[in-house]
């Protein structure tokens, strides 16, 4: 999906909601246990319940890999089921030396390799340029680079002030954002900024005025959709705000899909209000 198409979907659906498919087999409602593939049955019901409210889906690969070959099959079925008008994110947080990153990119972008054809993959910037560029060689595919993550540990390295050759001390995440923009433009590069880091969003928008930002951390992690939207929205939309647990596990009963829809609907309604102001 291109930048323009993603932006159009946001205004068509009046939503920049990304539903995180962090599907934990131990949290799936018990009545699905007899399904042939309970994880896929759960995801299918969540997708059916939210597809008109969401512009993106983000399976977190850890939840599938931890189930071995069965999990990978659930992931393949889930990805194939996501409607074509939704952007897909492999939340894999990969990145390694170039020849290894080549294989990671092939895993998520080449359907003939591992049976997956995601639009994008989350990538960690720590190993630098050659660890990121292999993902950019796939035309029409996106890198979503970790910039300032939602967790407490983001203070350990990302917020640490360091000096670079060209400027005085600045937080490491700012160097990541500036440097990565010399590798790819906003048609192929997004940044991850945690919703719990909304105080830095204004500054991040100055550094990356056109890039889409993937913003996880509303819902279970307590980030504010209002703060994120006020500082992060652009004329193109420019945001994908993710919620996983607060939607997926709104109920553990037979009404789980209805309750998931209600959670997604509440976020979408709020988003529609913010979009109307830009
Ligand atoms: O890259 C991510 O998606 C991510 C980055 C980040 O800074 N914080 C963060 O929570 N995430 C992911 O976003 C999802 C958040 O899930 P909930 O807290 O349940 O909404 C999980 O899949 C996390 O792995």
Image: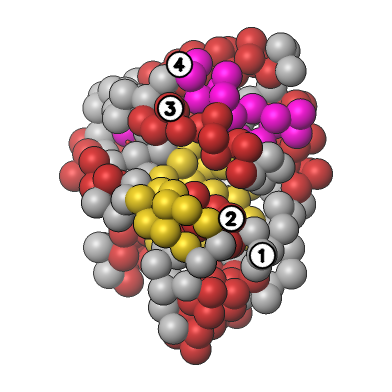
**Which residue of the protein is positioned furthest toward the front in this rendering?**
168
CB under 8 Å between callouts 3 and 2? no
Q: Which residue is mark 3?
A: 199
| The CB of the residue at mark 2 lies under 8 Å from ligand 1 | no
In the image, residue 78 above or below residue 182: above
- Mark 2 or mark 4, whichever is nearer to me: 2
Q: Secondary structure at mark 2?
A: helix
Precedes in sequence: disc 2 or disc 4: 2
In the rendered image, is residue 243 in sight? no
Colour style of the rendered protein structure: secondary structure
Q: Range of the magenta residues?
A: 226-249
Query: Which numbered disc flags the more N-terminal residue, 4 or 3?
Result: 3
Decide: marks 2, 1 in contact (CB < 8 A)?
A: yes
Mark 4 Cα shell of 10 Å, populated few (<14), some (14-19), many (≥20): some
Q: Earlier in the sequence, mark 3 or mark 2?
A: 2
Report which residue position mark 1 lands on: 182
| Mark 1, secondary structure of its residue | loop
Residue 245 forms part of the magenta stretch: yes
Rounded to the nearest whole Å, what is the CA distance between mark 2 and mark 4? 39 Å
Q: Within the magenta stretch, is there residue 182?
A: no
Ligand 1 picture quarter: top left
Give the numbered dot on residue 262.
Answer: 4
Disc 4 secondary structure class: helix
User: Gap in Å between the C-alphas at discs 3 and 1?
Assistant: 25 Å
Instruction: Give the residue displayed 39% in from the left and 67% down from the top.
Output: 126
Element under disc 3: helix
Q: Identify residue for label 2.
A: 178
């Amino acid at each position: 999906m291109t930048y323009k198409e993603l932006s159009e979907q946001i205004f068509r659906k009046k939503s920049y909601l990304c539903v995180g498919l962090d599907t934990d087999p131990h949290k799936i409602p018990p009545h699905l246990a007899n399904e042939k593939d309970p994880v896929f049955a759960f995801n299918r019901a969540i997708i059916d319940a939210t597809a008109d409210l969401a512009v993106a889906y983000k399976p977190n690969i850890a939840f599938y890999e931890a189930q071995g070959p069965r999990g990978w099959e659930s992931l393949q079925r889930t990805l194939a089921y996501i409607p074509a008008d939704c952007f897909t994110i492999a939340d894999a947080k990969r990145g390694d030396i170039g020849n290894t990153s080549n294989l990671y990119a092939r895993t998520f972008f080449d359907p003939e390799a591992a049976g997956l054809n995601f639009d994008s993959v989350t990538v960690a910037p720590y190993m630098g340029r050659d660890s990121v560029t292999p993902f950019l060689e796939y035309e029409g595919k996106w890198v979503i680079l970790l910039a300032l993550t939602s967790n407490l540990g983001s203070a350990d390295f990302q917020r640490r002030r360091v000096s670079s050759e060209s400027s005085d001390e600045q937080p490491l995440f700012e160097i990541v954002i500036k440097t990565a923009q010399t590798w790819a433009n906003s048609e192929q590069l997004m940044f991850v900024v945690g919703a719990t880091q909304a105080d830095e969003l204004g500054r991040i928008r100055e550094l990356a005025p056109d890039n889409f930002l993937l913003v996880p951390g509303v819902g279970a992690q307590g980030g504010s959709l209002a703060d994120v939207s006020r500082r992060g929205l652009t004329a193109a939309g420019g945001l994908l705000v993710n919620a996983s647990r607060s939607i997926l596990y709104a109920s553990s009963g037979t009404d789980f899909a209805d309750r998931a829809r209600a959670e997604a609907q509440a976020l979408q309604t709020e988003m529609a209000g913010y979009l109307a102001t830009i």
